Amino acid sequence: MADVGYGPYDKIWQRVMNAEYHVRYRANVINQGDQEVDQGILQDIYHIKGLLAEDECVLLHRLAGDTVARFGKDAVLCEIGSFHGKSTVSIATALQALEGGHLYAIDWQRGSQDFPDDKTGVYQNSYAAYQENLRKYGVDRRVTSIKLKSQEAHDQVPEKIHFLWIDGAHDYDSVKSDFRNYQKKLVAGGYLLFHDAVWTEFWEPFELIRDEVLYNEDYNLYAIVENILVFKKEKNKTRKLYLQLLQNTCLFVAGSARPFYKRVISAVLRIATSWCSWRVMNKKAPKTQEGQRVIAKIKKHSLKFFYNIFDNARYYLQQKKGQALPVSLNIEMTNVCNANCVFCAYQYDKRKKMSLDETLFRKALAEYKAVGGQKVNLTPHLGELFVDRDVIRKLRYIKELGFKEVSTYTNASLLHNFDVTDILKSGLTEVLISTAPLEEDIYGKIYRNNNYRKVLSNISELLRIFRHLNENHDPEMTVRRIAIEFRSERSLPECIQTADFQKFVKPYLTDRVQLGNFSRYDAWSGAITQDQLVAGMTIKDADFPKRLPCGRTSHIQIGVNGEVRLCGCRVDVNAVADELTIGDIRKNSLKELYNSEKVRKIKGSFYANRLLDVCKKCSWYEL
């Protein structure tokens, strides 16, 4: 296996994390020409309950298709561990598309330790959900379901199999039993895949791989994709140096009991892997749409991984000295809103409607400024800033304190109550507008009010004056960017083709006005369901690994009642108590609260995989 050759440092990182194996998968497997992944189906599959990442679903789909292509329509595939059928459907949809191959899916179907019942804490029977998913995707005739423990089922699988996916119980003895019982059935050239083998709270799967597979002369390391190790049953040609480094690295970073510094190193190595893979892929990957999408994803998330690690490492170091500083201060000026959006939990908010006491407002800002804070966000959890008729005076107070960034979301329906020039010179630096595509009927369905004509006029006037002040280089204007986010089922090109957009918005666009669209939404911890949304709008899945502290836990929010919480983004309106509340500004300073042990425990819950319920249910997780 040749080194790629971008310089000595790149080669070192390649060897440390075998980045070239990532590249071999992403450049050759994901883009191979034997079949086309139906991206619509695969994106839908990703929402099936389970712990497979998107790229892992794609990998299973691709390798299953490759298995049929190489071994013919009688190819036999075997899966150990199905749960709700996420991996089953990923594999079987490839078989269905090629009209060949058959999958034997083994699972005792009494639930998973990772998904116990929320109330009882015991395992849930998963067979009904599993069968429903097979029927939903029309793959049940391609799958034989064996409802037994894997140790009891090997006699029900044919003597020759061409693809073996091991993702059952993760203790050492179970993984060992699965490998020994089934690998002898795997034919030469067949694929052997292990899940939870690289970056994981489990160390046992990789320990078994080290003992039984890594140096086995019959198995050659084929690819590393996210948390999956892929081997091919062929003469082992992988250099021992690569295998030893992989072994040392994986065993170093795996395991739920590893100390914090090992977790930091684990994440840093993931950054390096993604970065090297991206560098190589830019040279090697075929220019297909899917290949370029993966490249863009790696490039984007590499920087986010790095910032997340840096930010949390800095927090833990500064927190010990009582000097940690939140990234931004979010202030809930009011919890009153004049809209009733289908995608928002405001409709279920039971809190008393009120505005934040001005004494607490000034206290929070003064304390945040005193410790060096620079970013203030005025978007309420559930409310509209411009309900407050005195908001311009309050914005000017923030401006006097000298914060660098002051932003807010608005539905733009109340802007006519103010002088638009005053808003643009108030101290706000960024205004984000949440609206529907500019057609009255769709606006009424999504925002459920009769304010469309006011919204349209307000947006148009805001943009007109914004453009005028920019062209005249007005030194008093503070707003540097306006973003308009269309919320519906439509794509952005469709949103900007409406007649009202062309007439009232397009004439005033500048390079400081950004346009975007939303079609996927958070469930607000279950308060919002799919049937409440307009057709085509979808609930974003919250069921995915959250291995590093959410970036939003580095932000704090002052609620209208004076309570201080982490995250200014999402709240569970049905919870008896807010799990992210860390104190009250009337009793403690922001500095004391953010450096408290409670914040440390909330951040640590991500590393320990013991997330708070509100974080488990949230799909707005970000690095």
Image (tube, helix red, strand yellow):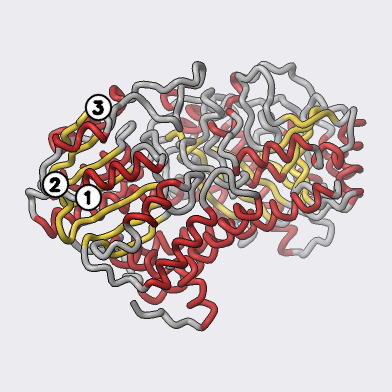
Residue 117, x across and y down, in percent: 46, 21
Picture coordinates of residue 546 (x, y %)? 54, 43
Q: In the image, what residue type sits under mark 1?
A: Gln
Q: Quadrant of the image for the N terminus?
A: bottom left
Viewer-proximal residue, 5 or 489?
Answer: 5
Specify whether 134 is left or right of 566.
left
The reply to whether residue 100 is visible in this rendering is yes
Q: Helix, strand, or loop for circle 1?
A: helix
* Callout 2 crowding tier (Cα within 10 Å): few <14, some 14–19, many ≥20: many
Marks 2 and 1, the one that precedes in the sequence: 2
Whether residue 44 is visible to the viewer of this picture, yes or no, is: no
* Mark 1, residue position: 183
Residue at image coords 37%, 37%: 169
Circle 3 residue: 131
Q: Is residue 161 above or below residue 439?
A: below
Instruction: Identify which residue, 216 or 290, lies in the foreground.
Output: 216
In the foreground, 170 or 526 = 170
Q: What is the distance, in whole Å, between disc 2 and disc 1 at their CAs?
A: 13 Å
> Measuring 75% from the left and 58% from the top, which residue is drawn there?
469
**Front-most of residues 274 and 609:** 609
Q: Which residue is mark 2?
A: 76
Q: Earlier in the sequence, mark 2 or mark 3?
A: 2
